Amino acid sequence: MDNSPRARNGGDTIAAIATPPGRGGIGIVRVSGPLVAQLAHAILGVLPQPRLALVRKFRDTRGQAIDHGVAIFFPRPASFTGEDVLELHGHGGPVVMDLLMARLIELGARAARPGEFSERAFVNGKLDLAQAEAVADLIESGSASAARAAMRSLQGEFSERIGKIAESLVALRVQVEAAIDFPEEEIDFLAEPALHEHCSSLQASLKELLEPARQGCLLREGMTVVLAGRPNAGKSSLLNALAQSDRAIVSPHPGTTRDVVREYMHLDGMPLHLLDTAGLRDSEDDVESEGIRRARAAIEQADRVLLIVDDAGAEGVELLQAYLPSHLPYTLLRNKIDLTGRAPGYVDTVPGETRQPTSSGAQIAVSAKTGAGLDVLRGHLKACMGFEVAGESTFSARRRHLDALARAAQALESAGAQLRQRNGELVAEELRLAQRALDEITGVFTSDELLGRIFASFCIGK
């Protein structure tokens, strides 16, 4: 049985509540598929004029009014999904919405899967895959910057840049394939400077695209930072200071934090997931030991660790470092400088030498109590991720996009190396792999399994 997205869109009609669960002034039920006209006549008594709001009663099987609202009809192909689409705008009560859904299913529609409307828009050529993902990113955006970046992707800016690179890549493939197909020619086409310049130009274009894509991914996903250290080092106070709220319990008694406390915030638009953890030490207390185990598990999943020590007694840093995976970058925070008098900001680790902001082991002096040094810390965290305030060229991107771009860049680099060696067949193969990686982004080539995972992450009704 073929269960691919293309096969699952087998001409049936789907319906879903397109507004969030709960009570509200307006609730919307969306319908898409070949039965839309038939359903409209059954519920409304008429098929509304295209794209004109019609005030009408929504009726059940006996002709009794379920609700009184607005109906809008979008005929194919000029609709979001590319199929006939009907939207019923009624009162936003859960019972009313459920009654409308039950009536539509009774008339032959079926409940839509998560993301199935966007999936149909992709299958019917209304959106490419990057644009379809941008729909979900726009809905889930946690900041104005992220929303603007998602909107730029939805409007096709990301796809357009991918398309231009892919088009140039195809042109290069044609030239290389021609050189392979006519080896008897006296001219060595693979030695032509223009061919090498074309390949170098493609590599540069892809490199230029990687940076805004990486920024777009940061806008969407952000970074996960774990606050770790000995008990009473001020981890919870630092979490509260950065989040500007009393999120974690602060107590002078060591070992107050037993579980992982999570807080979500933004740094100039970049999402930041802060995790406060139990103090790291040997303990015979079962509950505290479990808290330490969870702290170590959180550290394993972090993008970066803020290793917090009391500036008045910062010895034993080596023992704390033993809790950190060798590959994981960290920043040493000397907290409570309001008690020691140390100046806030970066701390010289060697006389006359200051650690670079992004280096692992950089030291920053802060006071969670007074806020001294926290601006330096915020800037440091953005620098560690290479984040810049989103500009007009930033668009929404995902980790799978970055992975595809990285594979395309690697293939182009290999193609350039093979071109210098005059290995035409290997150049052609590397160029093919590069094009295939780019095609994964927009969905020109994408496995049905991946499509299923992508659209399953969407909300129902979109």
Image (cartoon, helix red, strand yellow):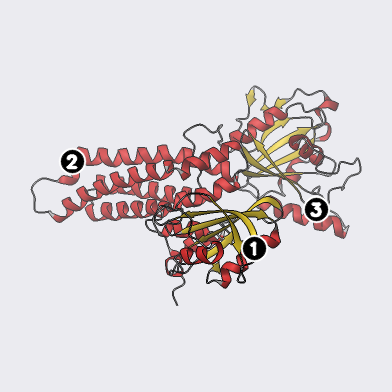
The quarter of the rendered structure image containing the C terminus is: bottom right
The dot on residue 259 is 3
Residue behind mark 1? 65
Q: Are marks 3 and 1 in contact (CB under 8 Å)?
A: no
What residue appears at the point 72 percent right and 54 percent down from the top-left corner? 23
What residue appears at the point 66 percent right and 52 percent down from the top-left corner? 300
Is any atom of residue 113 visible in this view? no
Q: Please give the count of numbered marks on the rendered protein.
A: 3
Mark 3 or mark 2: whose residue is earlier in sequence? 2
In the rendered image, residue 55, in percent from the top left (x then y), is placed at: 57, 52
The quarter of the rendered structure image containing the N terminus is: bottom left
Q: Secondary structure at mark 1?
A: strand
In the rendered image, residue 460, in percent from the top left (x then y), is placed at: 58, 59
Report the Cα–Cα distance between label 3 and label 2.
Answer: 64 Å
Q: Secondary structure at mark 3?
A: loop
Q: In the image, is 11 to the left or to the right of 140?
A: left
Q: Amino acid at mark 3?
A: Asp
The dot on residue 192 is 2
Report the Cα–Cα distance between label 1 and label 2.
Answer: 76 Å
In the rendered image, residue 136, in percent from the top left (x then y), is placed at: 55, 51
Mark 3 or mark 1: whose residue is earlier in sequence? 1
Dot 2, crowdedness within 10 Å: few (<14), some or many (≥20)?
Answer: few
What residue appears at the point 61 percent right and 36 percent down from the top-left corner? 269
Q: Amino acid at mark 2?
A: Glu
Q: Amino acid at mark 1?
A: Ala
Q: In the image, is 98 to the left or to the right of 228?
A: left
Mark 1 or mark 2: whose residue is earlier in sequence? 1
